[in-house]
Amino acid sequence: MDRFSFEAKCKDGTLSITIVTAVDPLKSSEHLLEYFPGLEAPKRSRVLVAKELYPRMYKYFEDVGNPVKRLVGSWAWDNYADAKAVFDELIAEGKSPVEAAKVAVLQARSFVKYHKPMGFDTVLSAEHKAEYKLFYFEIVKGGQ
């Protein structure tokens, strides 16, 4: 609705998700703002609220017998910006791109707010794709 979206798919415990519930012309990435031409002030969805959607999503998949065990996907837009800042610092400190990406993906705001509290903390793989402004990742709960 109004160019905002929430899509979550969980296949055999592997979650992939796309969510856009707010944009800010001064803070959001240029790639996200392409979907909101002419935006002059911050805008939030009146229907989709992230802090409500994430818990409902986790509960739904649990209730239907398909609990989320693995996060697979990419960080884009604002989440990319969060991870990229950490990635750049780590690269400047001498970390390898793989090491830096594994740490950086855990700093994206959606991860910190919604997935980390659910116990996800172990990065199995992470890759920075600068040309696409994306971080790809696979994250599981510790010990899985």
Image (spheres, rainbow, N blue to C red):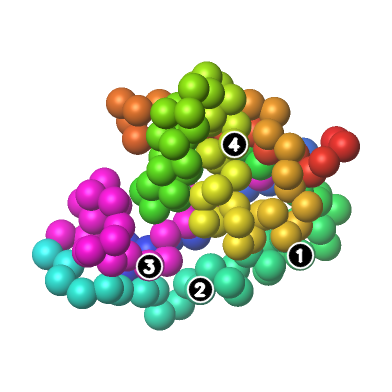
Please tell me whether mark 2 sits on a helix, a strand or a loop.
loop
Q: Residue at x 15, y 60 (%)?
A: 37
Q: CA distance from mark 4 to mark 1?
A: 27 Å
Q: Identify the residue position indicated by label 2 in the image.
A: 49
Quick check: can you spot residue 126? no
- The image shows residue 21 at horizontal and vertical percentages of 42, 66
Closer to the chain start, of discs 1 and 3, is 3
Q: Quadrant of the C terminus?
A: top right
Q: Identify the residue position indicated by label 1 in the image.
A: 59
Q: Eyeballing the image, is 38 above or below 99?
A: below
Residue at the outermost bottom position? 46
Please tell me whether mark 3 sits on a helix, a strand or a loop.
strand
Find residue 27 and report its image quarter.
bottom left
Picture disc at residue 103? 4
Q: Residues within 10 Å of mark 2 (few under 14, many from 20)?
A: some
Q: Is 11 or 117 nearer to us in this picture?
A: 117
Q: CA distance from mark 2 to mark 1?
A: 16 Å
Question: Is residue 111 in the magenta section?
Answer: no
Say what amino acid the circle numbered 3 marks: Ala
